[in-house]
Image (tube, rainbow, N blue to C red):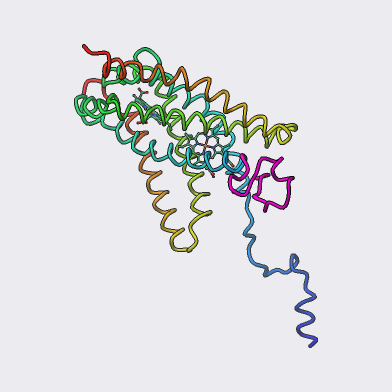
Amino acid sequence: MTTTASPPTGAGNVRRGGTLYFGDPGMWSWVLHRITGVLTFFFLFVHVLDTALVRVSPSTYDEVIASYKTPLVNLLEVGLVGAVLYHALNGLRVMLVDFWSKGPRYQRQMLWGIVVIWLLVMIPGTYFMLERTISELFGGA
Amino acid sequence: MAESTTAIALDRPRSPRRPAARRSNFELYSWLFMRISGLALVVLVLGHLFIMNILDGGVHRINFAFVAGRWSSPFWQFWDLLMLWLAQLHGGNGLRTIIDDYARKGSTRFWLKMLLYVSMAVILVLGTLVIFTFDPNI
Ligand code: HEM
Ligand code: HEM
């Protein structure tokens, strides 16, 4: 990591974006990368088990998959997609820092870049993922 | 005195009885693997999520018949197989690093890793079998 937490010794730290209470954005991007990676790994464990139900019987599989369509789980899916998307984008950023000669110099700009891309994908994405659930919940009929 | 001097004077790398080399390139390869697999997973997993959650009807159209339709094509079978192995090895390798980072006691580390490796093996074998033995007429 290029962003080791350094004690706040002067105004210089404020310019770097790190304060005693918030830390450097680079550190938070790494913490989030770790959390989203672990979360996805645990999801995958459950997901392979639920997919394996296709070997039990069609109706067993359909019953369990029906839970993916309930409002609460539907919302959790948006969270999962957001987590995987962040992990993927930040992973690409880490690779650019490692392999691209100008990567380290632009790592901060790339962090804001992935925030923008994440929002651009997640805003319409959330709409499409929840459209049906919301219209069924509030649209009546 | 002379004895110990000779012992010290022995150049370690030339000593015939130096301990077997414990250095390996494993961590380098694992670092590289995280990046190469990550690149492939961008396409595989983000593509999977887009198809499953957004494309025509998203999650609401998923059922046994849907899976049967997809796995009748070797393309999607291969896609899922590759995604299974890469995600499992990438995520498992990441978790190994995390265990090393946070587990302080040697025994805790050992048992957490055993748990990790066993669960990885179970998921890899089960997921692979499910793809290869899938029967649409069950
Ligand atoms: C809510 C989001 C998700 C939904 C609705 C979903 C849906 C599905 C479905 C219907 C299948 C059955 C096979 C097929 O039709 O291709 C499947 C298989 C699979 N999915 Fe997902 N998926 C989701 C997220 C993920 C994520 C995030 C990952 C990777 C980390 C993933 C990895 C896999 C793998 C590896 C298989 C093959 C399982 C096997 O070999 O038995 N999925 N998924
Ligand atoms: C979608 C594409 C993905 C990309 C581009 C990606 C990229 C990366 C990279 C480059 C690293 C290494 C970070 C470092 O060395 O500092 C990493 C770590 C990790 N990834 Fe992924 N990854 C992806 C998908 C996944 C999936 C599907 C899972 C879960 C099954 C996962 C779980 C993890 C974990 C647990 C770590 C370790 C985190 C840490 O040590 O802090 N990743 N990823």
Q: Does residue B107 sit above or below A29 in this rendering?
A: below
- Tell me the quadrant of ligand 1: top left
Indicate the position of residue A77 as horizontal and vertical percent values.
37, 28
Most extreme residue toward the bottom, as rendered?
B1
Q: Residue at x 57, y 28 (%)?
A: A115
Q: Does residue A103 sit above or below B95 in this rendering?
A: above
Quadrant, the C terminus of chain B: top left
Q: Quadrant of residue A53?
A: top left
Q: Is residue B75 magenta?
A: no
Q: Quadrant of residue A138?
A: top left
Q: Does residue B98 sit above or below A52 in this rendering?
A: below
Q: Residue at x 37, y 33 (%)?
A: B128
Looking at the picture, tell me which residue is in the foreground, B1 or A5.
A5
Q: Which residues are magenta?
A: A1-25
Indicate the position of residue A6 as horizontal and vertical percent values.
67, 51
Indicate the position of residue A117 as horizontal and vertical percent values.
56, 23
Q: Residue at x 48, y 24 (%)?
A: B46
Looking at the picture, tell me which residue is in the foreground, B97 or A119.
A119
Indicate the position of residue A101 as horizontal and vertical percent values.
75, 33
Quadrant, the N terminus of chain B: bottom right
- Total number of numbered discs in the rendering: 0
Q: Is residue A11 magenta?
A: yes
Q: Quadrant of residue B19?
A: bottom right
What predominant SS class does the magenta segment belong to? loop
